[in-house]
Amino acid sequence: MQRPEFTNAMRTIVRRGLRPGSPAAFAVAVLCVAGAGLARLGINLIAPNAVPFVTFFPAILIATLAGGIAAGIFAMVLSAGVAWWAFIPPRFSWDAVTSTHLVNITLFFMASAAIIWVSGQYRQVLRRLDEEEHYRQVVVDELGHRVKNKLATIYAILRHELRGHGDIWHSVAGRLRALSAADDFLVKSDGKGVHLRHILEMEMEPYDSSRISLHGDPVLLFAKVPAVLALVFHELATNAAKYGALSAPGGRLSISWRTAADQTEIEWVESGGPEVIVPTRRSFGSNLIERSLGGFGGSAKIEFPRSGVICRMTLPKPTVAAANTQAKVA
């Protein structure tokens, strides 16, 4: 088995465990009990009268997580036998069973049964999460493929229809390329670190850069935050191009950000565009902008002064703190 295949196989085992009821699952249970027995022997050298079952509970937990409920039950029974025979006086004998022994072994089985049940439920949850993650990835890949095909079709149609209008085609083609790049970014950025400036530059590419200013220190974002921010910035930029500062020749857009003690603050400020009219109802875009960051402990608030739209966003420190250090080192 090649190294990548081995790594993937180990990752699958750690994440989903071994096949329940398989020889490998029972082998892991035996190894866990053997390790617990050796650990209990080590304790025996220091405290011979310590609780006999203490090291076997982790063994049962690991055996169940790795091999399933059957392996956990097997580890429980095996642990009870080993502990009774080797660590409950008189040692190395099955004689002299007392009421205390029976109470101890009953409590051990009850605690072990609880561990096995909880661990089995945990395995089922992980399995469902893996299935959902796999399904989501398949859907995302398929949607990404379809969007690319549709954009390519639109690109070809517009190129043909606007073949006699070079200026218009140049403007439209640039925006289509930016939209395609944004879609690729949303699909590929999942879980990867991305600079905040890179997200903004990508979303602002279709517009006149001389009217847009970006100010802020290097900030690297991780997990799902980059993709969500890309959606937020895309919505803000689209609205600015339709109704706001980017829709008028003299309009300007200023985007600045700074990292405070416990959060990163981002400010989107439009000026010089048409006079802003406060909307009478909440649009889908406004809801998307103001609710998207809430799941990450952040926030976004849109204001509508007459001079131009302002959007203030915050991101919590855990999302960016380590990233700032890496960005400065880089």
Image: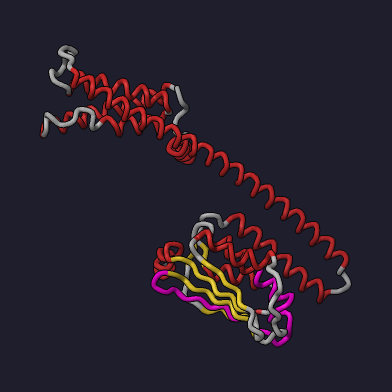
Residue 73 against residue 322 in the figure, above or below: above
* Vertical placement of residue 327 versus 305, above or below: above
**Residue 285 against residue 40 in the figure, above or below:** below
Coloring scheme of the render? Answer: secondary structure
The number of callouts visible is 0
- Residue drawn at point x = 38 percent, y = 30 percent: 116
User: Could one spot residue 150 in this view of the protein?
Assistant: yes
Using the rendered view, name the quadrant where residue 244 is placed: bottom right
Residue in the picture at 72% in, 69% down? 175
Please state the horizontal and vertical placement of residue 22, each as a whole percent of the image.
Answer: 45, 22
- Give yes or no for residue 122 being in the magenta stretch: no
Q: Is residue 210 visible?
A: no
Residue 132 position, x and y percent, is 57, 42
Q: Position of residue 89 (x, y in %)?
A: 13, 20
In this view, the residue in front, 265 or 187, is: 265
Is 217 placed left or right of 173 in the picture? left
Q: Where 187 falls versus 246 (above or below)?
A: above
Q: Nearer the viewer, residue 296 or 40?
A: 296
Q: Which residues are magenta?
A: 235-262
Q: Residue at x 40, y 69 (%)?
A: 262
- Whether 248 is among the magenta residues is yes
Q: Is residue 112 found left or right of 231 in the rendered image?
A: left
The quarter of the image holding the C terminus is bottom left
Q: Residue at x 49, y 73 (%)?
A: 265
> How far across and how far down the image is residue 6, in percent?
45, 37
Quadrant in which residue 325 is drawn: bottom left
